[in-house]
Image (tube, rainbow, N blue to C red):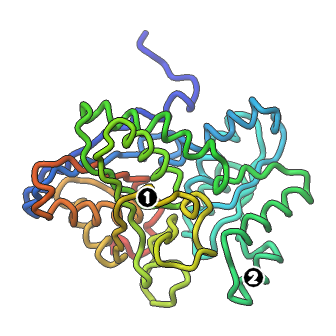
Amino acid sequence: MGKITRSLEELVGNTPLFEPVRYEENHKLLSKVLVKLEWFNASGSIKARAALNMLVEAEKEGKIHPGDTIVEATSGNTGIALATFAAARGYKFKAFLEDGSSQERFDILKAYGAEPALQSDIPSIKALMDRDELSMDGIIEGVRNYSEEHGYYFINQMENEHNPEAHYRTTGPEIWDQTDGKTDIFVAMAGTGGTLLGTARYLKEKNPSLKVVGVQADEASRIGSGSGQDAIDGVAPFRNVPTRFTTPFMLNSGDQYDEVIEVSSLKASQTAKELLASDGLFLGSSAAGAFTAAEELALRPENAGKNIVVIAPDDGTKYMSLNLYK
């Protein structure tokens, strides 16, 4: 009998690196754009890596035991990943999602037996929103206080070092091996910053001349912008924005990235639809944003012949209620 997988944890990592050759030809790209297809992870996104690592390390440290309730503030994918492994390892899970998160995220969390709620359901966070004083610190403090009041464990991806550690230990080495050490530029959007910083740290150690490019949504493409267009959700701006909106990892990153590119959700939607038509690549919102930035890099003459690796955190399944593919 062939190999049988008996734990979803065996299905985290070792995701493929895909080159959309027809899109490259259609747009006359000068570089190869290699897309890390992270929806092949159990739970359907790159957040499986950090979620599983944070759970396992919390168990090792004696902070959680089966039957406990785990709490997280999330834009969706980390929550879904935690719900997946919480169910598999015998925990209860409650997720506080960003206001404006897609309906699919709520429905998926409920299917896993998790309890989804909005961050604004926490009175202290709602008060900050009402005063237009919302900050990352305020969200962390609000969810931490809620967890302590109820005797729950706040896993806190925004400050948990086992988040970027997962990418230093797995995502970075996989990319290096898959490109035979020929990675010239690494591109990713940032939510907590765990993926960008953890992966970049490993790749920079292997190739100090490697260029790291962080990608953020432009002002009109952010949640709560009031622009009327869809936001690129699941990510947070980190350059040229008030520090209260910056995640702790990115705030303390010491500019471990070499360049920041801003992208529009409208351009990302166009890119997503073209990639689906040309190569059958079904990208999620932030993946389309990151690829849009990678395309810009691939058209620069100085990058001709280089390998650009871009992270695709998830596929388009959770975005069908939005305008990404309309």
Residue for badge 1: 317
Q: Is residue 91 above or below residue 128?
A: above
Total labels drawn: 2
Disc 1 to disc 2, C-alpha distance: 32 Å
Q: Where is residue 210 in the image (x, y as percent from the top left)?
A: 29, 47
- Mark carried by residue 143: none
Would residue 305 be found to the left or right of residue 102 on screen? Answer: left
Instruction: Residue at 45%, 66% (x, y): give it.
Output: 319
Instruction: Residue at 82%, 38% (x, y): give it.
Output: 63
Would residue 81 be found to the left or right of residue 13 on screen? Answer: right
Residue for badge 2: 128
Label 2: how many Cα within 10 Å (few below 14, some 14–19, many 20+): some
Instruction: Residue at 35%, 54% (x, y): give it.
Output: 212
Looking at the image, the residue that sits furthest to the top is: 1
Q: Where is residue 281 in the image (x, y as percent from the top left)?
A: 27, 54
Q: 35 and 229: which one is in front? A: 35
Q: 198 and 286: which one is in front? A: 198
Q: In this view, does 25 lie above or below 245?
A: above
Q: Where is residue 202 in the image (x, y as percent from the top left)?
A: 43, 39
Q: Which of marks 1 and 2 is nearer the N terminus?
A: 2
Residue type highlighted by circle 2:
Leu
Asked if residue 136 shows in the view, the reply is yes
Asked if residue 272 shows in the view, the reply is no
